[in-house]
Image (cartoon, grey):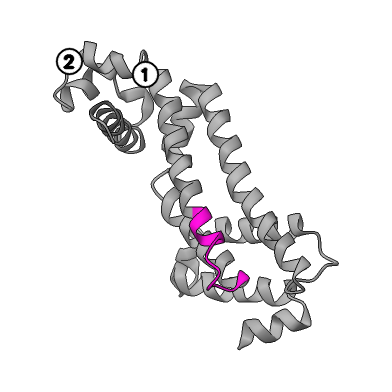
C-alpha cells in the first residue's frame, strides 16, 4: 500500500470510529483533519466533502465485510450449517457498533447515504444467506420444499429479536446461549433427512 493509500485508509478508519461513537451530524471534517494532525487542504485532497467521506466510509465498511463473508463461504473444510452460523455471528460482531441512535442520526442527516447503507446491508446479509440455503438445497442438505428466502428471513428476524435488550433482560440466558438454541431449532426444521443426520453428528 503506497503512502496516499495508507493516508486515505487512516482517514476512513478514523471517520468510521467518529461516526459510530459521536454521530455523523456532530463530526466535522475540520475536527477529523485536526485529530489526524493534517491540514484541511491535505484532507480535501482525499475527500472533497463530509458527505463524500461518509459514502466512502460506508463502502469501505461493507467491502471489508464482503471479504470476511467470502472467506467463510470459500472454506471447504466447513459444513454449510456451520458456515451459516459463522456468517450470522460475523454479522452480529460487525454491526454491533452501529447503534440505533447512530443510524437514526444518519437517516435524518443524509437520507441518500442511509438508503445506500441499507441497500448494501440487505444485499450482503440477505443475499448471502439465500445463496447459502440455495446451495445447501442443491446438495441435498436443506429441504427443497421451503424457499431459501423464507429460511433466510426467519433466521435474520430471530437474531434481531434476540438482540433486543428487553428480550435478553426477560430471559435467563445470554445471547450466545440463545443463539445456539434458536439456530438449532431453525436448522432442524430446514434440513433434509440427510442434512439432519450430518448436522447432529
127 vs 165, left or right, is: right
Q: Which residue is mark 2?
A: 39
Q: Position of residue 158 (x, y in %)?
A: 61, 61
**Could you tell me which quadrant the C terminus lies in?**
bottom right
Residue 108 inside the magenta-drawn segment: no
Mark linked to residue 28? none
172 vs 8, left or right, is: right
Instruction: Inspect this view and state whether residue 162 appears.
Output: no
2 or 1: mark nearer the eye = 2
Q: Position of residue 94 (x, y in %)?
A: 43, 51
Q: Residue at x 62, y 86 (%)?
A: 200
Q: Residues within 10 Å of mark 2 (few under 14, many from 20)?
A: few
Quadrant of residue 145 within the rendered picture: bottom right
Q: Which residue is mark 1?
A: 50
**Could you tell me which quadrant the N terminus lies in?**
top left
Instruction: Inspect this view and state whether residue 118 appears.
Output: yes
Q: Position of residue 129 (x, y in %)?
A: 64, 56
Mark 2 vs mark 1, CA separation in Å: 15 Å
133 vs 163, left or right, is: right
**Which SS class for mark 1?**
helix
Highlighted range, magenta = 69-80
Quadrant of residue 40 within the rendered picture: top left
Q: Residue at x 66, y 49 (%)?
A: 127
Q: Point out the residue furthest to the right here.
A: 145
Residue 70 inside the magenta-drawn segment: yes
Q: Residue at x 49, y 67 (%)?
A: 170
Amino acid at each position: 500500500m503506497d503512502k496516499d493509500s495508507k493516508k486515505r485508509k487512516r482517514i476512513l478508519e478514523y471517520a468510521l470510529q467518529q461516526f459510530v461513537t459521536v454521530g455523523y451530524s456532530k463530526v466535522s471534517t475540520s475536527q477529523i483533519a485536526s485529530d489526524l494532525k493534517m491540514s484541511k487542504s491535505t484532507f480535501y485532497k482525499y475527500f472533497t466533502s463530509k458527505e463524500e467521506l461518509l459514502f466512502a466510509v460506508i463502502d469501505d465498511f461493507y467491502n471489508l465485510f464482503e471479504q470476511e463473508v467470502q472467506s467463510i463461504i470459500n472454506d471447504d473444510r466447513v459444513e454449510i450449517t456451520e458456515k451459516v452460523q459463522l456468517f450470522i455471528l460475523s454479522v452480529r460482531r460487525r454491526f454491533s457498533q452501529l447503534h440505533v441512535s447512530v443510524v437514526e442520526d444518519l437517516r435524518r442527516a443524509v437520507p441518500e447515504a442511509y438508503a445506500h447503507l441499507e441497500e448494501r446491508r440487505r444485499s450482503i446479509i440477505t443475499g448471502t444467506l439465500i445463496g447459502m440455503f440455495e446451495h445447501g438445497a442443491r446438495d441435498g442438505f436443506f429441504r427443497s420444499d421451503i424457499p431459501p428466502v423464507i429460511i433466510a428471513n426467519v433466521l435474520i428476524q430471530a437474531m434481531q429479536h434476540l438482540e433486543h435488550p428487553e428480550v435478553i433482560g426477560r430471559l435467563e440466558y445470554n445471547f450466545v446461549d440463545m443463539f445456539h438454541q434458536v439456530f438449532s431449532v431453525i436448522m432442524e426444521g430446514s434440513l433434509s433427512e440427510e442434512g439432519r443426520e450430518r448436522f447432529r453428528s
